[in-house]
Image (spheres, rainbow, N blue to C red):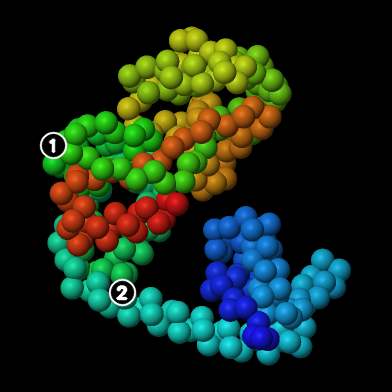
Amino acid sequence: MNDQPNMPDWNQMRALLATVETGSLSAAAKRLGLTQPTLGRQVAALEESLGLVIFERVGRSLVLTEAGQQLMTALREMGAAAERVTLSAAAQSQSIEGVVRITAADIYAGHVLPPVLEKIQAVAPAIRIEVLATGSISDLLRREADIAIRHVRPDQDGLIARRCKDTAAFVYGTPALLDRLGRPQTGDELARGKFVGPLQGNDDFIAEMARRGVKLGPENFPFATQSGMTGWEWVRRGMCLGAMVEAVARLTPEVTVAVPSIPPIPVPVWMVTHRELHTSRRIRLVFDMLVEFFS
């Protein structure tokens, strides 16, 4: 009969390591990109598989037991070993070189991409990243770009796409603008506001808002631009209201959600490349790192 404890999963051990290093389940979940309940289940599963009580709750704090403290020594060694593996893999990528062109909407290029571009450069410094901040699918079809970040699944021949984690968009405005609107609480009250829209029309956005009880018309859009960066700057300055994905709005402390009770608009994220280009080492590396970042 085998009396040995079950072999713990590395994800469970990584969850424990992050919890101790950050000091709380919530901070550890944020570091690892998990929800707090998911991370808590991983720590609990580790305790069960090892047959140990690792944490004791003291008020709202988690305190390592003596067994937990002994376990952390080995876990830190494992974490260091995992980091060495990552660095070794990165070193293997040093020989990958050349240009990789990414096309994305300008708002994504300016606000969302910088962290992953820095990571790609650190892993493969011989790769030159060129970003076409246009958001036009024709960039791929004309071979002006190798990889595209899109919010709709492309149906053109010769392209392959990976769906990443969906995001969501809310309507935002500055506190001063929302004060002038009387701090809207309902869709009807929000519909009194002025919005920025794209040059090519607002039909899709109007339909999405109508499904959420906000009835908008052409008169709600006195401002229009082809540039997401420009439109967002107008929103940040308090000129108008505007819809934006959470990832960008989080980086813009001047704005707030206009009516939090209105459900967000789901925004899918697709990573797209040419079928034959996906076999290129440098394009494959960048494509996979983008998928991981957006997932």
Count neighbours of disc 2 (C-alpha within 10 A) and say few if under 14, some if 14 to 19, many if 20 or more.
some
- Answer yes or no: is residue 106 visible: no
Q: From what the image shows, is residue 204 above or below residue 132?
A: above
Looking at numbered disc 1 in the image, what kind of residue is underneath it?
Arg
Q: Secondary structure at mark 1?
A: loop
| Residue beneath disc 2 | 90
| Residue beneath disc 1 | 142
The residue lying at 57 percent from left, 12 percent from top is 215
The residue lying at 42 percent from left, 22 percent from top is 197
Q: From what the image shows, is residue 94 above or below residue 153?
A: below
Q: Report the front residue among 58 and 156.
A: 156
Q: Report the front residue among 203 and 184.
A: 203
- What numbered label is drawn on residue 36? none
For this view, does 277 lie left or right of residue 252?
left
The residue lying at 38 percent from left, 76 percent from top is 86
Contact check, label 2 and label 1, Cβ < 8 Å: no
Q: Position of residue 156 (x, y in %)?
A: 22, 32
Count neighbours of disc 1 (C-alpha within 10 A) and say few if under 14, some if 14 to 19, many if 20 or more.
few
For the N terminus, give its image quadrant: bottom right
Q: Secondary structure at mark 2?
A: helix
**Farthest residue, direction right:** 59
For this view, does 89 lie left or right of residue 250?
left
Image quadrant where residue 66 sits = bottom right
Q: Position of residue 214 (x, y in %)?
A: 59, 17
- Answer yes or no: is residue 231 visible: yes
